[in-house]
Amino acid sequence: MTPTNLLDAIRVVKENERIAYQSYADAAKNIRHSMGKQLFTQLSEFEKFHLEQLTILEKSLLEKGEYVTYGGKTFPLPPKFEINAAAEPNKKSMMQIISEAMELEKHAEKTYADLATQIDDPQGHQMFQRLSEEEHNHYRILSEAYWTLNDFGMWKWTRI
């Protein structure tokens, strides 16, 4: 991948991360249930972290032509309890919010995995591979939230 194409790709994924973190922040404001609010707040913070790290990478590539070390970030452990979602007045809307978030995560996972295969630098490859894995974890968390809310009418968030 040429440096110009890489910088263009980084700018695209930065915009995707900005959209994701803002979408999750908006979702957290619209969800009444505390567990759903907590989930989307943490997802928003995670995506904002990705945006910040990609900005650091972009700057390093522009100024020094070097990749940066990306240690990743661990998703906070969820509580061990289940909470009845009856307080969520608009379940259908909530399911749509989660579905859209799942699509964002699936797209981000694939984009980062594709970028990882195009990067020869071991540090750059590792960074994009790790970003892909983190987005996959977000997808799994959202998928579990979707199915437990849909099937059991409760927010359940286990330690994935």
Image (tube, grey):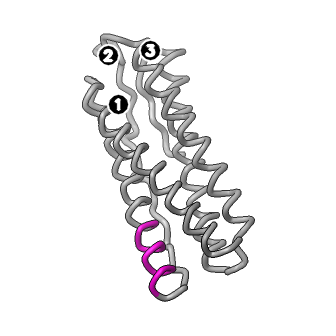
Q: Which residue is mark 3?
A: 153
Q: CA distance from mark 1 to mark 2?
A: 9 Å
Q: Is residue 87 left or right of residue 137?
A: left
Q: Is residue 56 left or right of residue 6?
A: left
Q: Furthest residue to the bottom?
A: 64
Inspect the magenta stretch and tell me whether residue 87 lies in it.
no
Q: Secondary structure at mark 2?
A: loop
The image quadrant of residue 133 is: bottom right
| Amino acid type shown at disc 1 | Gly
Q: Are marks 1 and 2 in contact (CB under 8 Å)?
A: yes
Q: Considering only order in the chain, which callout, 2 or 3, is on the residue closer to the N terminus?
A: 2
Q: Secondary structure at mark 3?
A: loop
Q: Furthest residue to the front?
A: 4
Binning the other alpha carbons within 10 Å of mark 2 as few (below 14), some (14 to 19) or many (20 upward) gives some
Magenta-drawn segment = 54-63
Query: In the figure, 6 relative to 134: above or below?
Result: below
Binning the other alpha carbons within 10 Å of mark 3 as few (below 14), some (14 to 19) or many (20 upward) gives some
Q: Which residue is mark 2?
A: 88
